[in-house]
Image: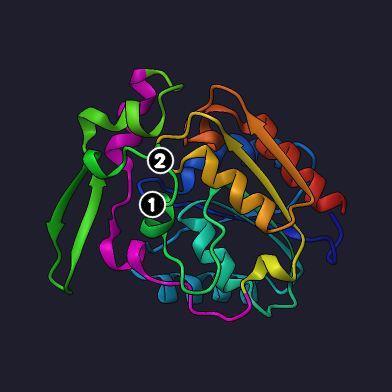
Amino acid sequence: MNEQSPVVVLVHGAFAESASWNGVVERLQAQSIDVVTAPNPLRSLDGDAAYVRDVIAGIGRPVVLVAHSYGGMVITEAAAENPAVKALVYVCAFAPDQGENAFGLSVQFPGSTLGDALDTYPVSTGGNDLRIKPALFNHQFCADVPAEQAAVMAATQRPATDVALTGNLVTASPAWKTIPSWFVFSDEDLNIPVALHRFMAERAGAKDIREVAGASHALSVSAPEPVTAAILDALSA
């Protein structure tokens, strides 16, 4: 790609890590598209967004921001009034408005079973870390992924703080209000109810909405093809 072509920046969410994008990265690179995976600290919404803004600034080119799950909170803040960001792709992700947070949104509609699947333990910097119990990870997070692969994902999951997941979106200019957005999500997501996905996509005035039947929350792992297709649409626009 030429130096002015957008770089695709992939931001993972809670209970995942950058390797969750591998299938998408492989497909984008096969089409000679420049792509960067940004490791999400999962410590606080403000801090995580500041880190992603630093990643964007370091690239020095236009970007298409793509996020999974809680990562949607992060890119909505990081892309606010950021002229480098040309498009947003929400992959089973939160697209919050000002004052909303991940936990609050997840219970706005029935269907999330995440709360009962979490382990909680204190961290020395204050607050608590949250992770999905390994025995429940396959069912809760990636029910359409083989058990052996799910076990690896459970072992490599990155915990998120309760501060991050309850932190409200601060910006008065959520990025999806001014930047074109694409949404791709599954109808059997046990972390974020499909009714919420539909609500957020409609509220954002999404350019395109893809709903993947029978898929889990871990859409970039189990169904990288429709995820990649949504990103390609955003790039071509």
Q: Pointer 2: what residue?
A: 110
Q: Amino acid at mark 1?
A: Ala
Q: Residues within 10 Å of mark 2 (few under 14, many from 20)?
A: few
Query: On the picture, is 5 further left or further right than 102?
Result: right
Q: Quadrant of residue 80?
A: bottom right
Q: In the rendered structure, does residue 165 fall within the stretch colored magenta? A: yes
Q: Which numbered circle lies on residue 14? A: 1
Q: Which residues are magenta?
A: 147-173
In primary-sequence order, the first of circles 1 and 2 is 1
| SS at badge 1 | loop
**Residue in view at x 55 percent, y 80 percent:** 171
Query: How far across and down, in percent of the image, does residue 73 sit?
Result: 50, 62
Query: How far across and down, in percent of the image, does residue 8 sit?
Result: 69, 55
Q: In the rendered structure, does residue 227 fall within the stretch colored magenta? A: no
Above or below 218: residue 67: below
How far apart in space, not on screen, are marks 1 and 2 (Cα)?
Answer: 20 Å
Query: How far across and down, in percent of the image, does residue 104 sit?
Result: 38, 59
Query: On the picture, is 167 further left or further right than 115?
Result: right
Above or below 170: residue 214: above
Query: How far across and down, in percent of the image, does residue 155 sit?
Result: 27, 37
Query: On the picture, is 202 further left or further right than 70?
Result: right
| SS at badge 2 | loop
In the rendered image, the residue lying farthest to the front is 109
| Foreground of the two, 60 or 11 | 11
**Residue in view at x 57 percent, y 58 percent:** 95
Q: Residues within 10 Å of mark 1 (few under 14, many from 20)?
A: many
**Residue in view at x 41 percent, y 75 percent:** 47
